Amino acid sequence: MIGIAGAGAFGTALAVALAKGGREVRLWARDAAQVRLMRETGRNDTALPGVDLPNGVSAHVDIGEICGGEALLLAMPMQGLGGALDAWPQIEGRQPLVACSKGVDLTTLRGPVAVIEGRRPGARAAILTGPSFAADIAAGLPTALTLATSGEGTALQELLSTPTLRIYRTDDVIGAELGGALKNVIAIAAGTVIGAGLGESARAALMTRGYAEMVRLAGALGARAETLAGLSGFGDLVLTCTSSQSRNFRFGCALGRAEAFDPRITVEGVATARAVVRLADGLGIDMPITAMIDALAHGKIALNDAIGQLLSRPLKPE
């Protein structure tokens, strides 16, 4: 049995894919009414409309009922991960605990694996990340993800792989964490460029220079450059910066158009930008795009001023 804590779009999509791959999946949701509807309708239209839940998926409101299996996937926003673990003593480290979050914790300035290990010392912690939209995974479209863990990950890799969900593994946890986190910030920037009407050439330049920032910070924290060039870094960056399915990209478009954005939608890149600015400042690392997105998202600078400051930076070798 595989437990999934979090019945949002991504958690639900993973449940669908894994159940179609022959696994028993127990999907937890905080809202009892949502669980009741999933049981009655065989769908989770609250998070992933129009997708049928296979017979192998059961819905639960008691967190204890999804624990104790072969793995527990923690499919929740990054900024809620630590609090959830604090609130759920039922979650123990005897089973692998796999984060499905992308971001940097605002309190600890650490990634999801470090947050898990801090709350559950000795746990077999991992992160599942990479270029993926929930709708694609649920529809059975080919998707490849990265599983990062500092321990032996072969069994977990096999457990989470299906005919349409291909899992690669790495022991570079920091690189996988930062790739998934930082690309959200750059996706906001890419959306801002498009929303402001600056053109595709500007987006390409922004993605390239943003990727340089990702590599710069990740390297300073001990990550390997090849990890950032893989699925969890470059792959996810391309997907998120070029599709309106990305919440971070859509938020950026709204910024570029000076439009309001639905506050009910989680935009992980906003909190990540704030955390990364603090992290980079402490390390003395220059991350101008990230700093501008943090300032823009919090209303500290006007869009035209942000563009002007980035374009007027001193010329230098690439």
Image (cartoon, rainbow, N blue to C red):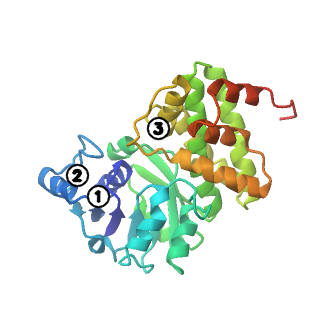
Q: Is residue 9 left or right of residue 121?
A: left
Q: Which residue is mark 3?
A: 246
Image position, residue 173 (x, y; %) = 61, 63
Q: Mark 3 falls on what kind of element?
A: loop
Give the amino acid type for the residue marked by disc 3 in the picture. Answer: Ser
Cβ–Cβ under 8 Å for marks 3 and 2: no
Q: Cα distance, mark 3 to mark 2?
A: 23 Å
Which residue corresponds to the image point at 42% horizontal and 76% vertical from the top-left?
A: 95
Give the amino acid type for the residue marked by disc 1 in the picture. Answer: Ala
Give the amino acid type for the residue marked by disc 2 in the picture. Answer: Leu
Q: Residues within 10 Å of mark 2 (few under 14, many from 20)?
A: many
Q: Is residue 272 above or below residue 95?
A: above
Q: Which residue is mark 2?
A: 53
Foreground pick, 17 / 264? 264
Cβ–Cβ under 8 Å for marks 2 and 1: yes
Q: Which residue is mark 1?
A: 19
Among the two numbered marks 3 and 2 on one chain, the one whose residue lies closer to the N terminus: 2
Mark whose residue sits in front, 3 or 2: 3
Image position, residue 222 (x, y; %) = 73, 62
Among the two numbered marks 1 and 3 on one chain, the one whose residue lies closer to the N terminus: 1
The part of the image, by quadrant, that contains residue 211 is top right
Q: Residues within 10 Å of mark 3 (few under 14, many from 20)?
A: many
Which residue corresponds to the image point at 52% horizontal and 25% vertical from the top-left?
A: 258
Q: Cα distance, mark 2 to mark 1?
A: 8 Å
Q: Mark 2 falls on what kind of element?
A: loop
Mark whose residue sits in front, 1 or 3: 3
Residue 235 in view (yes/no)? no
Residue 62 in view (yes/no)? yes
